[in-house]
Every structure is written in C-alpha cells, then in structure tokens.
Amino acid sequence: MAYTSAYGPSSMSSGLAADVQSLGKLKMEAGKSSPEAIKETAKQFESLFMRELIKSMREATMKSGMLDNPGSDLGTDLLDQQFAVQMSGQPGGLSDLIAQQLTRQMAPATDGATAKPVTPKATSTESTKNTLTRSTLNSEATAVSKTTRPATTSQANFVSKHSEVANKVEKASGIPASYMLGQAGHETGWGKFEIKHKGGAPSFNLFGIKAGPGWTGKVAEVTTTEYINGEPKKMVAKFRAYDSYEDSFKDYARMISDSPRYAKVKESTGSAHAFASGLQKAGYATDPEYAAKLSRAINTTLQLRRVQV
C-alpha cells in the first residue's frame, strides 16, 4: 500500500510501516543523516504505533457478528492503516520526539576538531525499537496526566495504603498493581464504601466479588445496585469476606488468572482500556458504563503511582 499522508505521497518509502520487520529498513533510511530522511522515518514509526493503538481499540470493541467476515476485516485493517498515516507527522506529535532521538543517535561523535561518523551496530533495529517504546510510554504517561482529573486526598491515601500488597500480588500473578488498585478504588469509592458485616466489621472485600455457590468462606450480606435490562435495581446480595486486604487481592488475582471466563482479560494487561473493556464483556459487573468508569479509575491510579515513585 502506497504511503500517503496529509502532506502528499512520500518519496522515502513505497509502503506503510505496518510491521516490526520494516524497522530495520527505516533505520537505514534515517542513517543517511539528512533531516528529511530522519523526519520521514519518525513519521513512519509514529504510523506504526498509531496503527497498533487503533488495532487494540478495535479488539476492545465488541463486534456485532452480523456483518463480520474476512473481507470486512481486511477492509477495516486497510482503513486503519490509512487512518494511522493521516494521524502521524503532526506538529508537536510523537514523531517530533522520535526525530529528536534519532537525530541524537545519528549525530557524529566529535573528538577535538575531528568528527567521526557513528558506526551502526548490529542490533540497531532493536535499539530503535527500544527508543520508540520509551518515547511511546512517555507520551502515554503525559496523555494520562492531561486527560485525568487531579487526584483527591482520599484517592491518594487509598493508593498509598494498598500499594505494598498490590505490588506483592502483581509479582505473583502478573496483573499490574495499578489496575488492581484502580479497580479496588472504583468498587469501594476509594475506601469510603467498603463492604461490611451487619455489625460494622470490615469484610476486607475490595473488589465486590460475590459469594457464589462454590464459595465456602465467610459471607457479608449487603444491599447493592444491580442493572437489569439497563435499569438500576436495589437488592440484597451475598459477598465474600476475608481476614485481610491481602487475602482480597490474592482472591481477585486468583479468579482473574484461573477462571476461563476471564482468560482474555488476563491477556489484555498491556492496555488499561482493553483490560477494563474485557472485564465488562466477561460480565464482571452489570453496570453498562463499567468499562469507562474503571478506565478512569485506573488512569487516576497510574497518575498517583507515577508521582509517588
């Protein structure tokens, strides 16, 4: 597919940078050291990232199933490639950061008055991929800060209180601590509305996990809101109760990791949006807005933990 951007056809490449194998060729183009070549390479890298971003968003969106077929999937993929190209290379965007990094990498090393060109290493492709990844993560972190409301004191205290346990469970399960903290914060109103026994004793249930037929542990009965056919209804439900918050985190991680129902959720930890959408699709909660609310909570946690670190 011919590379076309908002500025017209490219003279640097005959195809879109749509796979990792293209990175080596693009790096060689940038190695010519001309500003135009570096700028074009940066745009191609940004196109690659934007395409993967759009792809993950597509995968996180539930399909209707009525018109889905290999032909429509191909058409969607080609359209996504075009979108990725058109969104890349904008002033102040990710491509500018990549171009700056590539320029520094390609700059000749000076020794007194003699300049010696840098010899490309055999692992230049991998090095460029790592550079792109770091730039991408920095951009995503900045985006989260700009789109997320400033955290409240109660949110900061909640994250600080449970971070140590969340980190411990992350090491054992692979589920990001920030995702678990964000979900626990959302489920409990950041600690304000934790599930309690009738006498007021804590149940230590931070994730709103109900006590189904297979649960043999302690139980707390509370009035909760469930959505039936999109309408909120109040009802009494039984929830699992634990001896500590750590037990709550461990039980949640065990459920997400071991239950076939959440198999795709465990595979979506690379994106907060995909993770939250996967939980909603798997039926974790009946709230039709659960994925959007949980995504915001996780972004708040990411913001807080970045500041704390």
Image (cartoon, rainbow, N blue to C red):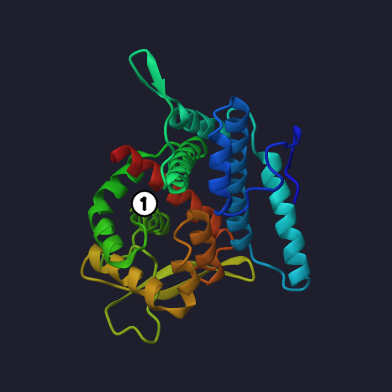
Element marked by disc 1 = loop
Which residue is at a point 56% across and 35% down the rendered structure image? 30
Residue 153 appears left or right of 243: right
Residue 215 appears left or right of 120: left
- Quarter holding the C terminus is top left
Q: Is residue 224 visible?
A: no
Nearer the observer, 272 or 96 = 96
Mark 1 = which residue? 190
User: Label 1 is placed on what type of residue?
Assistant: Trp
Residue 134, image x and y in percent? 43, 42
Q: Quadrant of residue 73?
A: bottom right
Which residue is at a point 42% across and 35% down the rendered structure image? 119
Residue at the extreme left: 243
Residue 115, image x and y in percent? 41, 20
Residue 244, image x and y in percent? 21, 66
Residue 300, image x and y in percent? 42, 45
Q: Is residue 167 visible?
A: yes
